[in-house]
Image: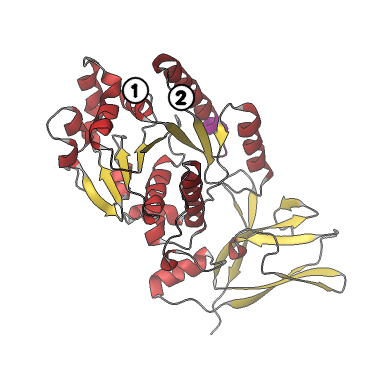
């Protein structure tokens, strides 16, 4: 049984999204998974389509009102069981305060009932209290989602300090691995954050980066993991790689998911959205972008239309001494950047732009429908 706490002292950094999607991906790989919602907000519970606020959960287990199996929800997604949480869980800390072994309550439940699971994922609350301590005390390792921000790095440092104290107190080994989330790995700022994690913080660093996608929020709204709601989204592919990394670290063979779970190559989110709504792949249009005012030795193009891989599926032409990029994409609105002699930047020839989440600017391209 691999017990992983998904934690960061900063809220809103992708813990619940990671817990839901990693659980679903591991389940798809024939692993038996238990997802424990330790956050009184119950977002992992909601994100898996359980909207009953009267649903019993961890509070009832800790208060001995119900047993572990009486509150367990089986196969909320294939091979994934859920131990749910509601706002009543906020009242559990006063309940546990005077109990002997108060920080071992979750561990004791797992030792008693959790042995038939391959993986136990614990979605932790952002605050440090008895709930978080119970999660970390039960865990064998910590996966810390971290976005590209100073506050997230500070939360990661605090988490490392806390796990260090717990390791010393209970004589346990509790390694922390940082997982970059909501990342644009091509920006200089994102690379700076990665270097700081790697060089300045005493934590491990996942080899996977979870890219930003609005489809993750949509999937949570509909109570589904990405693998079921938008299997072609970029982040869905990233979570597949994360599951493979977890299996490899556990010494288990990677089990390839069924063919229908794998995305066709280079499917954009616009294509995925169209397929979700209509069941049909949209007609791709030819796009020609001219760059008349840029002098450089090498110019590349990357955006939503080619999974942000520079010049992937793009033809480069030189017309009258100017750069021209030719590619096809389905109708929609796309964000993109150009790479000028190795430097990423917005397109200075295009006034349509939008701020990205890392403090930079992306250019906007609209491809209309041609009838």
Q: As displayed, is residue 94 above or below residue 212?
A: above
Label drawn at residue 23: none
Q: Secondary structure at mark 2?
A: loop
Residue 313 x, y percent position in the rendering: 66, 69
Q: Which residue is mark 2?
A: 173
User: Does 364 sit left or right of 324 as displayed?
Assistant: left
Report how far apart the C-alphas of labels 2 and 1 lie in the structure. Answer: 20 Å
Disc 2: CA contacts within 10 A as few (<14), some (14-19) or many (>=20): some
User: Does 337 sit left or right of 246 as displayed?
Assistant: right
Observer able to see residue 49: no
Q: As displayed, is residue 195 above or below residue 268?
A: above
If the image is split into quadrants, where does the N terminus sit? top left
Q: Nearer the viewer, residue 242 or 254?
A: 254
Query: Residue at image x 81%, y 54%?
Result: 341
User: Does 195 sit left or right of 167 as displayed?
Assistant: right
Residue 315 lies in the magenta-colored region = no
Q: As displayed, is residue 133 above or below residue 317?
A: above
Q: Which residue is mark 1?
A: 129
Q: Which residues are magenta?
A: 147-153
Residue 152 lies in the magenta-colored region = yes
Q: Residue furthest right?
A: 321
Residue 114 x, y percent position in the rendering: 27, 38
Q: Residue furthest bottom?
A: 371
Mark 2 or 1, which is nearer the eye? 2
Residue 183 x, y percent position in the rendering: 57, 46
């Amino acid at each position: 049984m691999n017990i992983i706490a998904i934690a960061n002292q900063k809220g809103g950094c992708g813990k619940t999204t990671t817990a839901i999607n990693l659980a679903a991906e591991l389940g798809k790989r024939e692993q038996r998974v238990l997802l424990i919602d330790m956050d009184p907000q119950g977002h992992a519970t909601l994100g898996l389509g359980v909207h009953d606020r009267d649903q019993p959960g961890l509070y009832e287990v800790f208060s001995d009102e119900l047993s572990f199996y009486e509150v367990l929800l089986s196969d909320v997604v294939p091979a994934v069981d859920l131990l749910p949480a509601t706002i009543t869980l906020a009242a559990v800390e006063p309940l546990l305060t005077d109990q002997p072994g108060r920080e071992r309550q979750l561990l004791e439940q797992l030792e008693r009932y959790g042995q038939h699971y391959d993986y136990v994922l614990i979605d932790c609350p952002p605050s440090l209290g008895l709930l978080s301590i119970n999660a970390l005390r039960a865990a064998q390792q910590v996966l810390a989602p971290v976005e590209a921000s100073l506050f997230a790095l500070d939360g990661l440092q605090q988490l490392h300090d806390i796990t260090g104290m717990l390791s010393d107190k209970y004589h346990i080994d509790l390694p922390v691995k940082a997982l970059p989330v909501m990342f644009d790995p091509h920006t200089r700022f994102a690379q700076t954050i990665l270097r700081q994690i790697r060089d300045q913080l005493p934590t491990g660093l996942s080899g996977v980066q979870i890219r930003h996608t609005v489809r993750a929020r949509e999937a949570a709204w509909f109570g589904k993991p990405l693998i079921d709601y938008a299997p072609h989204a970029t982040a869905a592919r990233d979570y597949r790689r994360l599951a493979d990394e977890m299996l490899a670290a556990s010494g288990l063979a990677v089990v390839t998911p069924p063919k229908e779970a794998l995305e066709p190559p280079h499917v954009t989110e616009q294509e995925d959205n169209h397929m979700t709504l209509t069941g049909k792949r949209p007609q791709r249009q030819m796009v020609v972008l001219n760059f008349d005012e840029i002098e450089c030795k090498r110019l590349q193009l990357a955006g939503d239309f080619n999974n942000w891989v520079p010049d992937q599926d793009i033809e480069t032409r030189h017309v009258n001494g100017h750069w021209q990029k030719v590619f096809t994409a389905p109708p929609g609105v796309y964000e993109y950047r150009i790479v000028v002699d190795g430097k990423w930047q917005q397109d200075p020839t295009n006034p349509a732009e939008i701020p990205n989440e890392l403090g930079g600017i992306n250019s906007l391209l609209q491809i209309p429908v041609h009838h």
